[in-house]
Image (cartoon, rainbow, N blue to C red):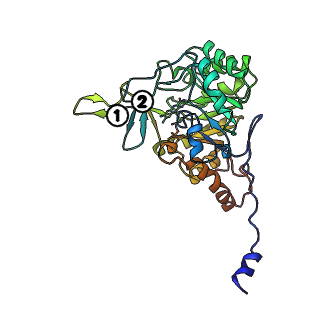
Amino acid sequence: MNATTTQAEAPPEPAVDLSVELGPLKLANPIGTGSGTYGKGVEFQSFYDVARLGCVVVKTITVEERAGNPPPRLAETAGGLLNSIGLQNPGVERYIAEVLPKLRTLGAPLVINIAGHTVEAFGELAAAFGAEEGIAALELNMSCPNVSGGLDYSTDPKVAHEVVARAKDVTDLPLIAKLSPNVTDIVPIGLACQEAGATAVSAINTYVGMAIDWRKRKPILGRGFGGLSGPCIKVLALRLVHRLYQALDIPVIGIGGIQTADDVMEYLVAGATAVQVGTANFYRPNCALEIVEALPGLIRELGATSVRDVVGTLEMPG
Ligand SMILES: Cc1cc2nc3c(=O)[nH]c(=O)nc-3n(C[C@H](O)[C@H](O)[C@H](O)COP(=O)(O)O)c2cc1C
C-alpha cells in the first residue's frame, strides 16, 4: 500500500458547525473583536478578510465628540496592558456620516458599541443607530472605567436595568449589555440587564488598576489610573463568565485575555456562546482569524461537531 492509497482511505474529518445564535443575531462563528482594540476594522483588512470573523465590535461612540484623556494613555505592565483612552471618538453625528459607510463594507456583522453619560443619552444613541442600515446589534458600554461616571451603569442593578430598558424602548436591534468586573457580584447586574430585555451580556470590560513610577512618585497614566486587560485577566474573566452562564437564561459573550483558540475553548466550556478578542489584536493582528481557523480542530478533539455541543459543558467538582 503506498502513501497515496493510505491518504485516500483516511476517513474525512467531520464538518464542524461554528455558527452561533445570540437571540435573533446569527453569527457564522463565535469570534468577534473587543471594542476599542480593533480600530474601525478597516485597518485590519490589510491583514486578512475581516468578513471571516463572526462579528466586528467597534470602539465606543458617545453623543458628543470626545477628545479622550490626557496622555500617556497606555502603560505596559508586567501583567498586562493598562489603558486610559477615555472614549475618544468623533460623536454620533460625524460617526454616522463619515465612519459608518466604511464599516458597512467590512462584510462581517457590525456591532456598534455605545456609551451615554446619562440614561437618556444611551436612548439617544440607540435611536440614532437603530435608524441606520447595516447594523447587526448594539453593545451598551455600561462599564468603561476611563470616564467619570462610566462604571455607574453596571455597578447598580437598578441603573443597569434603566439603561437597557431605555435602549430597548427605542430600537429593535439586539442589545448586548457589556458588564464591569469591578463589582462585588456581577450576577445581579447581569440579571437586571436580562430582565430589562438585553439579548445577551458581554463580560468583561477592564479591571481598574494603576501603574506607578516610584522615582517620580507619580502614576504612569495621565489620568492616574486605567483599565487592565490582556492574558492576565483571563482566569478572572472565566470565573465571571461561568457564574453568569449559570445564573442567566440569555447568552454570555466572553471577553478577557483571549489570544488563542485554546483560550476560546476555555470560554466556551465555561459557558460563553461567543467571545471577543481584545488586546491580542495589538500585538498579533492576525490572531482573531487564526482562532477562527484553529477552532474546528479543537472542537473535534472533544468529539463534538458544533460550538453548541461545547458551550457550558464544564464539569465542576461536586
Ligand atoms: C486600548 C483599549 C481600549 C478599549 N476601549 C474600549 C471601548 O471603547 N469600549 C469598550 O466597551 N471597551 C473597551 N476596551 C475593553 C475591551 O473591549 C475588552 O473588554 C477588554 O480589554 C478585555 O479584553 P482583552 O483582555 O482581550 O483586551 C478597551 C480595551 C483596550 C485595551
Closer to the camera in the image, 39 or 236: 39
The spot of residue 65 in percent (x, y) is 53, 18
Q: Quadrant of the N terminus?
A: bottom right
For residue 10, what is the image quadrant? bottom right
Crowd around label 2: few <14 · some 14–19 · many ≥20 (10 Å): many
Does residue 260 appear to the left or right of 132 in the view shown? left
179 w.r.t. 315: above or below: above
Q: Residue at x 42, y 39 (%)?
A: 81
At a point 59% along the width and 37% down the height, the residue shown is 42
Left or right of 103, for residue 69: left
The disc at residue 226 is 2
Examine the rendered structure and indicate whether residue 290 appears above or below residue 30: below
Q: Closest to the observer: 249 or 204?
A: 204
Q: Position of residue 213 (x, y in %)?
A: 27, 33
Residue 316 is at least partly visible in this image: no
Q: Nearer the viewer, residue 150 or 132?
A: 132
The picture quadrant where one finds residue 100 is top right
Looking at the rendered structure, the kind of residue marked 1 is: Ala
* Secondary structure at numbered mark 1: loop
User: Is the residue under label 2 in contact with that under label 1 (CB below 8 Å)?
Assistant: yes
Give the CA separation, mark 1 to mark 2: 8 Å
Where residue 68 appears, as percent x and y from the top left, is 45, 23
Q: Residues within 10 Å of mark 1 (few under 14, many from 20)?
A: some
Q: Which residue is mark 1?
A: 211
The amino acid at mark 2 is Gly
